[in-house]
Image (tube, helix red, strand yellow):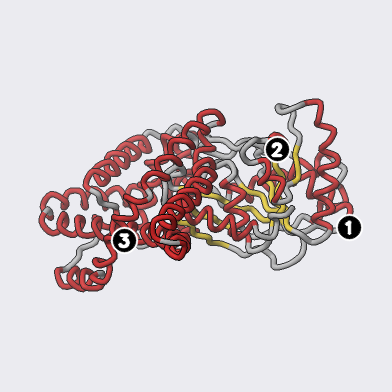
Amino acid sequence: MWLYRAMPLISELAVRSYYRVTVAGARLPADGPVLIVANHNNSLVDPALVAAMAGRKVRFMAKSPLFSHPLIGWLIKGVGSVPVYRQQDDPGKMSQNLDSFRDVHAVLAKGDVVGIFPEGISHSMSRLAPLKTGAARIALGAAQQRGTDFPIVAMGLVFRDRDTFRSEAHVIVGESFRWQDLVSEATNRSAVRELTERIEQAMRAVSVNLERWEDEPVVRTAEAVWRAEFGADASPAAEVERLRITTEALQALRDGGADDWREVALALKAHGRALHRLGLTPETLRSDVTLSAALRWALGRLPLVPLLPISLLGGVFFWIPKRITVAAAAYTARLEGDDTVVTHRVLVGGVAFPLWIAVTSLVIGLAYGWMAGLLSVMLQPVWAFAALAVGERRQAMWTAVRRYFLRRFNARRLAPMRERQRDLAQRLQQLLARTLPSAS
């Protein structure tokens, strides 16, 4: 458990280096036992996100093979994880789960936080996998020892593009719920089933569950069109809620055999592809930017111009460790599944970049003296993160400039697209009102 206390800081550094992370929703109870339940699509990045955003130290349940994994076994043990023995890993070790459950009950009895992924697997499916009963059994067993229940909190981990560097990752924290009515029946299978169902409902409320990945462009375009045309709340929590509602509506329409949803879905896909080709979004298509507003925006970003060489030189200097990280992670991920790509990039990058900094600083020290080498060790990490930050702003600035000129000089071409978007928004409103009246 030597890494347990440092886990939140290490996790935050790792996930914020790779993703642009936002956290929204409720807050974890500040003290006392809590059981966190989260969806699991991104291997070891998922517990890192939970640990970073929980605001409290978290002990995790982890499948037993991870403890002997040649690359990450030391990390799993170091953060105080508790092993779970699964049928598919080794049927002969299933009896050891009794010891694991006792350990987790003791952790909760102390008032600590335990994190678990009730699906029991990390996967690349577009929706929650069927939940195992382990989370409910752990909760009920701990409650039986305590004589009372304790909060269970669902965390939804929603990735815009899971494998893409610096894409968005939203962590949605659900409201904690209590289940005191089940404590007296803790030994009954019916209580386990009931609590598992409540956990699933809580997890579905903070996650997006598509019938298949092919639906994602439709759902995301629908949400963006709705937000652009009706001025909806743009916060991550509100965005995920709209994605969830849109997904439910699409599924309800499909199950009901309605034909008009197909036409709207095809139109949304086509609209999304057209916007992507032009580098626009539903919001930027709808908005008009005056010349004076564009000039004010440009003047406000002039201080960024002298910093652009930092980004360009940083991209050249750190190209080698970046390529090593991508290539090595791709190889190792092929052996373990698509959901491990980012995990291996973070782990390999955590070795490759410090090693690169050490080697180049040693060369600089040998060439120009130990003071120069020491200065290189201290400044290179700052340079790397500064180059990353400046590079993102440079890309955003270029995108904004391109969009301005596109809207300014192609108004006639964009006018039909705007009309089509307004029409799509109206049709979406009608479909939602018919399918999920409470959501419209």
Residue marked by disc 3: 310
Image point 55% across, 56% down: which residue?
A: 172
Tell me the mark number nearer the camera, choosing from 1 and 3.
3
Q: Could you tell which of marks 1 and 2 lies nearer the N-terminus? A: 2
For the residues marked 3 and 2, what is the alpha-carbon distance in whole angstroms? 43 Å
* Residue 63, numbered label: 2
Q: Is residue 428 above or below residue 259?
A: below
Secondary structure under the numbered disc 3 in the rendered image: helix
Q: Is residue 429 visible?
A: no
* 54 left or right of 218 in image: right
In the displayed structure, 393 sits above or below 161; it is below
Residue, disc 1? 147
Mark 1 to mark 3 CA distance (whole Å): 59 Å
Q: Residue 3: x, y in percent?
A: 68, 54
Image location (x, y in percent) of residue 354: 50, 51
Can you tell which mark lies on residue 318? none
Nearest-to-viewer mark from 3 and 2: 3
Q: Amino acid at mark 3?
A: Ile
Residue at (35, 51) in percent of width and height:
317
193 left or right, relative to 131: right
Q: Position of residue 344 (x, y in %)?
A: 53, 40
| Quarter of the rendering containing residue 10 | bottom right
